[in-house]
């Protein structure tokens, strides 16, 4: 199954909340896969976290039966939810307030109900969670204090190191960026990781999980 | 009334066809042909006002000439009406084709009479507030300008319809406990509404855009002489999401008479929307939803009920969210943002 992906150009779908996110994720996906990929259209969109969880089964089903997409990449912001940890990766563990756990569970439950179609058994999973928001990924390497660990530690002691609004302010110069400007800034920031994503993976395990998923497609 | 429409080179509808139900909700990106579909119906209605021409040649002008073909529902199922257009924007004649034996001129006249009654609405607050002095008061103007005059006329000429309108208004707008159409000191029609538990009475000129639109929709829905086809652009315009159910239900009573309320006539309804909340209300009737798709400069139509696996895809998710996600189509094209693209047919079709 996964070896098929390694032999051909990957055909992927990306479920995101905006074209800006999608553009940035496209660069990061290429960086991890170390090759271009073909993006399945039409663009998949969701209206925030509850919507992502609701539409995900329908999106997987649509991709499975109606397209030849090999994988689906889903990235969400953690916002104020519980941050995924290694402990959550234990067999049969599931944290109901962890978005990574919930996305993976939804993916697992959906694909296992689908019969093989279009020459593959299932649509492969690529799940990432940006803690607390994707703008933190964009600041990676530019501010050593912005990390997933810093956010989780702040959550634990009840004193968050920064707000999501502050992250936006630092990336865009405003917390109300236009879509066009947000796209330009997002692409400019993730271009720094086009040749090497190790720092991003180290500082943000929610991205490392996505990278691991993507690499597993080629490693089998 | 209209069973199906086939468009050829008509505006953005190069080669598109659509089957119509009694109620039809059109969704799709801007510029995807929703309004062109309505425009086609309206032009056909306008041409139906002209005496039938016996000398409309078939095939004149070559294959690129615009043409719109209408098939009809019983009792006119044997008829096909073909609208020929000299250019993409100028339609000049109808052909009346009877597919089952010799045509009956009386039946054709009855059909022509029905088709010429088609109407289109796109309500505008400024027009509704300004009023429609000089406009006829039996039929609502396309922008709703003569709303007050129509309701006042109805109070006198069609008291049953007037009462149905009042009931609809007071149910949907519970902040008012009385509504009536009267004339002011200058003799102009005015709609007065009394705020609950307050002595204050306001007129329709003081209403918000959304409230005026609601009054106008209820006016159409309780029309004692409804048109054969009623087209409403942006049905959700100005309405709070929680009012959409009342608007839909009122129009359902017009398109599906007999569902709990006796009324004198009915209309086929074609409405456009960009509201996922309004679409949510059609979850149980996907056959009533038409998805317009834009492919470059051309557009096509597809029924939501024709999407494969629709029931499974709708499990646990609202129809509006499903639409927004893109898996059933009807979403805007977006610039490429990374990764070469391979286009799929949303809700079905080829994957590459």
Image: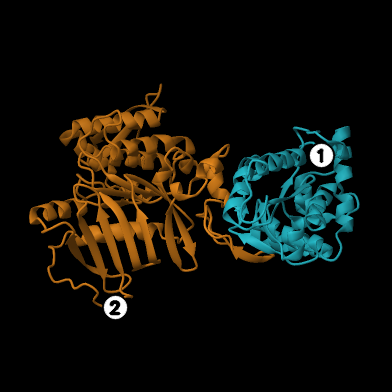
In the rendered view, how is the structure colored?
Answer: by chain
For mark 1, does the 10 Å Cα neighbourhood hold few (<14), some (14 to 19), or many (20 or more) residues?
Answer: many
Which chain letter goes with mark 2?
B
Q: Which mark is residue B239?
A: none
For mark 2, does the 10 Å Cα neighbourhood hold few (<14), some (14 to 19), or many (20 or more) residues?
Answer: few
Q: With B141 as the anchor, is A208 left or right in this view?
A: right
At horizontal 85% and vertical 55% (from top left) the residue drawn is A140
Which secondary structure, mark 1?
Answer: loop
At horizontal 49% and vertical 57% (from top left) the residue drawn is B29
Viewer-side residue, B112 vs A94: A94
Q: With B299 as the anchor, is A135 left or right in this view?
A: right
Task: Locate residue B74, reporting x and y percent.
Answer: 21, 47
User: Relative to B263, does residue A64 appear above or below in the rendering?
Assistant: below
Task: Locate residue A168, reporting x and y percent.
Answer: 75, 51
* Residue carrying label 2: B62
Chain A display color: cyan
The quadrant the N terminus of chain A occupies is bottom right
Instruction: Work out which residue is located at the far top of the displayed protein and give it.
Output: B197
Same chain shared by disc 2 and disc 1: no
């Amino acid at each position: 199954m996964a070896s098929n992906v390694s032999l051909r150009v990957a055909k992927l779908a990306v479920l995101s909340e905006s074209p800006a996110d999608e553009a940035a994720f496209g660069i990061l996906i290429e960086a991890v896969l170390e090759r271009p990929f073909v993006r399945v259209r039409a663009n998949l969109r969701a209206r925030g976290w509850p919507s992502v969880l609701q539409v995900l089964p329908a999106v997987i089903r649509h991709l499975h039966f109606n397209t030849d997409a090999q994988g689906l990449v889903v990235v969400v912001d953690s916002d104020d939810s519980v941050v995924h940890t290694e402990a959550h990766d234990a067999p049969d563990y599931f944290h109901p307030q962890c978005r990574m756990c919930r996305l993976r569970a939804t993916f697992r439950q959906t694909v296992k109900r689908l019969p093989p179609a279009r020459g593959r058994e299932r649509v492969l999973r690529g799940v990432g969670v940006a803690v607390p928001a994707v703008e933190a990924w964009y600041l990676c390497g530019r501010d050593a204090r912005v990390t997933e660990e810093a956010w989780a530690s702040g959550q634990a002691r009840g004193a968050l190191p920064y707000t999501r609004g502050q992250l936006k302010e630092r990336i865009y110069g405003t917390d109300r960026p236009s879509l066009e400007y947000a796209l330009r800034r997002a692409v400019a920031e993730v271009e720094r990781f086009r040749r090497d994503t190790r720092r991003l993976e180290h500082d943000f395990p929610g991205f490392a999980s996505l990278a691991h998923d993507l690499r597993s497609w080629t490693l089998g | 009334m209209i069973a199906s429409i086939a468009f050829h080179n008509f505006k953005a509808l190069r080669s598109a066809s659509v089957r119509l139900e009694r109620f039809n909700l059109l969704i799709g990106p801007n510029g995807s042909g929703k309004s062109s579909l309505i425009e086609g119906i309206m032009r056909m209605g306008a041409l139906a006002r002209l005496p039938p021409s016996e000398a409309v040649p078939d095939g004149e002008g070559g294959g690129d000439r615009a043409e719109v073909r209408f098939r009809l529902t019983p009792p006119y199922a044997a008829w096909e009406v073909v609208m020929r257009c000299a250019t993409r924007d100028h339609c000049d004649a109808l052909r009346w084709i009877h597919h089952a034996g010799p045509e009956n001129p009386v039946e054709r006249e009855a059909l022509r009479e029905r088709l010429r009654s088609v109407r289109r609405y796109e309500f505008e607050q400024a027009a509704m507030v300004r009023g429609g002095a000089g406009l006829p008061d039996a039929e609502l103007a396309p922008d709703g300008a003569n709303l007050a005059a129509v309701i006042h006329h109805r109070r006198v000429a069609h008291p049953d319809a007037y009462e149905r309108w009042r009931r609809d208004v007071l149910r949907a707008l519970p902040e008012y406990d009385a509504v009536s159409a009267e004339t002011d000191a200058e003799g102009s029609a005015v709609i007065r509404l009394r705020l609950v538990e307050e002595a204050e009475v306001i007129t329709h000129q003081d209403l918000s855009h959304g409230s005026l639109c609601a009054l106008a929709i209820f006016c159409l829905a309780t029309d004692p002489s409804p048109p054969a086809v009623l087209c409403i652009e942006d049905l959700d315009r100005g309405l709070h999401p929680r009012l959409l159910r009342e608007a839909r239900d009122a129009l359902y009573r017009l398109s599906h008479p007999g569902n709990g309320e006796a009324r004198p006539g009915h209309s086929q309804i074609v409405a456009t929307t960009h509201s996922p909340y309004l679409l949510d209300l059609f979850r149980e009737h996907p056959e009533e939803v038409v998805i317009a798709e834009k492919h470059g400069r051309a557009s096509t139509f597809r029924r939501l009920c024709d999407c494969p696996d629709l029931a499974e895809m709708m499990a646990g998710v609202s129809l509006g969210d499903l639409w927004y996600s893109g898996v059933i189509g009807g979403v805007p094209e977006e610039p490429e943002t990374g990764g070469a693209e391979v286009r799929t047919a949303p809700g079905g079709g080829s994957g590459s």
